[in-house]
Image (cartoon, rainbow, N blue to C red):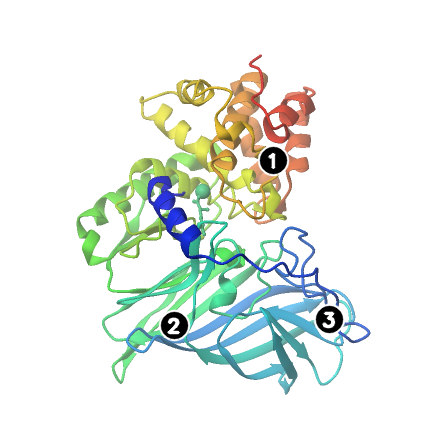
Amino acid sequence: RINRRSMAVLAALVSVLACAPTDEPPPRAAAGRHAGAPGIGDTDFPRDGNGGYDVANYSLTVDYTPASKRLTGVTKIHAKATQDLSSFNLDLTGLDVAKVTVDGDPARFSRKGGELTVTPAAPLVADSPFTTEISYSGTPAPAKDTANLGTYGFIPTADGAFVASEPNGSKTWFPSNDHPADKATFDFTVTVPAGLTVVANGEQTAPPATSGGRTTYRWSERHPMATYLATATIGKFQVREGRSRGGIPTYAAVDPRFKTSLDKVYDLSGEITDYWSTVFGPYPFSSTGGVVDDYSAGYALENQTKPLYGGFDPDEGIIAHELAHQWFGDSLTIKRWKDLWLNEGFATYAEWLWSEHKGKKSADAIFKDFYNRGAQDPVWAYPPGRAKPGDLFNESVYTRGGMTLHALRKAVGDPAFFKLLKTWTAQHRYGNVTTRQFVDLAEKVSGKELDPLFDAWLFQPRRPTLA
Ligand code: ARG
Ligand code: ZN
């Protein structure tokens, strides 16, 4: 979730400092008869991801030293060709590539913009698995997207790095098919100066091992994950581990500046994950938790199993938001960025459900407050069902997205609405989703014709009338 107050200050600053972004032509396939496409097909982000293959696993080996900001990495990718491939692309920005192999043999490669083009010694055959290994190093530079109000990706900090990559910042620290439409499992082997902690996704598969003044951490996320949710946040951390009351392994880590938040983040993360499991269906992953770093990002990100809070003490509303994303965004992942309300509208509505659950303001009262801000409020001019690439995280995607779900709940009634949420998460667990699929399922579960409701709430540039 975005801390709107700090972002407004940042936006003002950025608009003063930024130059206009260059307008790049749409990508063309690289030369070669069976070249893989340089984009996965998301027309709003034409160079994000790549075509022609599907990644199954990333094994990331990263060595990082905060004092020099130097990163050395080897990324091993297990993938399957989805067409014959004379070459294929990966996404990577900055950093120097030393060597690329495909199925163990050296491959030619070239760089242009954020694209790394790999030409294997022998072409790859459709439907065949292959591995590629990329050796690289350098000083990672985070992405700065002024339109989307943020610095994201691998962000060096005084004592380590803050790693939060939505929407397309994984390319700032490892070569990848950097688009949510291609999910994969992840293994992390990260080595840092002794005394620092590395927090990645999933669970630790071995205790940290120190030799020669450096410590290696091993983490593994065994469930499919979008690249933007991958993290290896590094720094001085105080850690608390255990299980929630419901038995879900829980890991909390806070920068020493936030040491008084450790118990609260730990306790609330467990309690909220347990509660959401009763509302949204079984928790999709093998552990839950939260990380508070001292980098003032102006936002939090729902990194899979390890939501990351950027430089503030999170309250229960934002913890409820990031943990709701474990179902909506992380387990069920959008196929195209324009459907972002399926993440943010749901996570925002979850905040309202949490408030209602705690006996504070009801979701209905919160809905009415927003509605009564009046017909001139900017959210009514921005239809949330089609997130704009230059303004993905607009408040409408969050608030009007959440209001859409409340309008739906009122139209179909509580039993159908909550049945729909559980059916949705069960049917698309670990997969990719679209708005059309949600509308179709809502109609099926409720037995009602809902196109007019969704059209008014998601796609029209005006305030809908209340039924
Ligand atoms: N998905 C995050 C949340 O709402 C927001 C991330 C914002 N990212 C950014 N680069 N500003 O929980
Ligand atoms: Zn969110």
Q: Quadrant of ligand 2?
A: top left
| Residue reaching furthest to the right | 33
- Report the residue marked by disc 3: 128
Give the class, few, some or many, for how many residues have Cα within 10 Å of label 2's Cα (few <14, many ≥20).
many
Pick the quarter of the image with the C terminus. Answer: top right
In the image, residue 389 above or below residue 230:
above
Residue 385 image label: 1
Viewer-side label of 1, 3: 1
Front residue (pair 279, 140)? 140
> Is residue 249 shown left or right of residue 400?
left
Residue 373 place in picture, x, y as percent: 43, 21
Q: Is residue 310 visible?
A: yes
| Disc 1 residue: CB within 8 Å of ligand 2 | no
**Amino acid type, callout 1:** Gly
Residue 366 place in picture, x, y as percent: 40, 22
- Report the residue marked by disc 2: 190
